[in-house]
Image: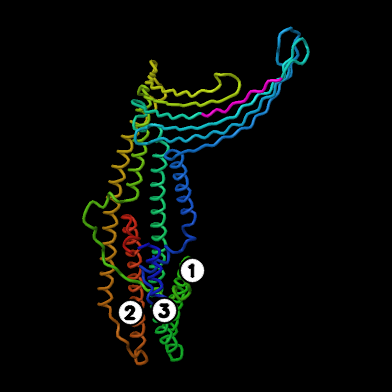
Amino acid sequence: MNRNFAYSFILLLASNHVHALNEYLFIGKILQSAHLFEVAAINLEIKEIELLGDEQQYNNWHWNLEGKVLLSGRLQDKDTNYTYTHQQIKSDRLLSTELTRRFFSNGSELSLSLSGSLPKTSEEKYKNQSYYSDVVTNASIFDAEIGWQLPLLRNAGGALNQKTYDLATLELKDEQLVFKEFKENTVASYLKTYLEYAILGEQVSLLEVHINQLSLIDNHLQQGAFDDKIVSYSGRVLSKIKTRLMSLKDEQLILSGKLESVLSANELASIKPIYYPLKTNPPGDHELSLVELKRIRIEQLKNQRQRRYYQNALKPELDFSINASRAVQKGNYSSYSESDITDIEVSLNFEYSLSGDVGARTLLRKYQLKSRQLEIKYSNKLESLKVKKQALQLKLQASLEEADLINAQLNRLAIDTLEFKQMTVANIKLYINRLIDAVELKLNYHDALIEYQHTRVDYDNLLDRLIVNSL
């Protein structure tokens, strides 16, 4: 099923239940936001157009048609007793066509051509400076030719002619990987924002609940006959939490600004966090599927194609060719003006530079060294990705352990809803402090969750499976 259609279908099912928006549907919304990928998509389309052009240029029939109408004249005077042409007018109508094709499988080239012409010459003869006679000659000429050339050493197998097309094919594959990586990174960036926005929403709700509790206590203290110190203390605590709430709302507003480019207001309000456990690696050598490694592989293939090109360029040129032609001519100017001639030519052409091709040898050495350079690059990148993967796994585990630790502390700090109006000043202050401790622990817990979610997204992004997992 087409990927975009699948996302459209899922989103359609969820359109009547906006509250059902989850992480997978959100990724679908990102992928459907064409404006995010337009520039990258245009780059990919440009490469596709270039490859199509190269394919038509190097692996297709080429048909040319040529026509020509000619009219020329000459006027001359001669002081002679012999007959000469005083005035001459020539006309010709020519039409020719040629069909050629290169075959990449063996490097051969086939050409077929047809041409026809109708030459006509009108002459006015003079003798002793006086008019002598008129002569008109005309003819019809038809030519047909077929030729085939096959390289046996240099360019055998199309090693030279196909170079541009092969490199264009590899560049298109590379651009497809670039586009895939860009989409994956874009999804990762928005998904982090999505998860952080959702968790911040819970933090905002948490603070609003505790502000209500503290406001009730603060009002009770202000209305009762309590010591100024406890009233002042309660006011400072309440003010501090309100400031924290405003800060969180500002952060949430910034995040919502980014999300509004891909979500409607209802969808934005429906975001709910989903906490996934630590993901283990799928079985198999997943490293070989990473985009960064695939791009290095493409570099190696391009380099290999260049080596093959210059290796072939250093070979002697040995070409086998066969040509056959037929020319049919009819005219009115003599008994020999009608002819039908067939020619066949078979040749074996050899050429070799005794001094050698310095440029080809130099470039071949360059690409041979680059092969080793790319091997090292691939090995280093693979090791770097393995280290990064292990580091993210440890970070994921550490985030979960931190969240579990905070959760355990919260369980030990369980606060019952008490009737603070019956409390003493000391008990009220202790209760306020326990509320603040609980608030800080809960905020720290959510911060740990944000850290975990960001790391999880980075982990899946590293393995290029954010989009795959959402399908």
Q: Which of the 4 image quadrants contains residue 374?
A: top left
Q: Amino acid at mark 3?
A: Asn
> Can residue 203 be seen at all in this image of the molecule?
no
Going from N to C along the chain, the mark reached first, 2 or 3, is: 3
Query: For the N terminus, which image quadrant?
Result: bottom left
Nearer the observer, 469 or 456: 469
- Is residue 10 depicted above or below 327 in this figure? below
Mark 1 is surrounded, within 10 Å at the Cα level, by few (under 14), some (14 to 19) or many (20 or more) other residues, namely few
Q: Amino acid at mark 1?
A: Glu
Identify residue for label 2: 434
Mark 3 is surrounded, within 10 Å at the Cα level, by few (under 14), some (14 to 19) or many (20 or more) other residues, namely few
Q: Amino acid at mark 2?
A: Arg
The span from disc 2 to disc 3 (Cα, nearest Å) is 43 Å
What predominant SS class does the magenta segment belong to?
strand
Identify residue for label 1: 260
Q: Nearer the viewer, mark 2 or mark 3?
A: 3
Identify residue for label 3: 16
The span from disc 1 to disc 2 (Cα, nearest Å) is 38 Å
Q: Position of residue 401 (x, y in %)?
A: 25, 66
Task: Give the magenta-colored segment's residue range.
Answer: 134-142
Q: Nearer the viewer, mark 1 or mark 3?
A: 3
Badge 1 marks a residue whose secondary structure is loop
- Is residue 85 depicted above or below 277 in this figure? above
Say which mark, if any, is on residue 223: none
Q: Position of residue 456 (x, y in %)?
A: 32, 62
Badge 2 marks a residue whose secondary structure is helix
Residue 299 appears left or right of 265: left
> Can residue 61 be seen at all in this image of the molecule?
yes
The residue sitting at the front extreme is 335
The span from disc 1 to disc 3 (Cα, nearest Å) is 19 Å
Residue 397 appears left or right of 21: left
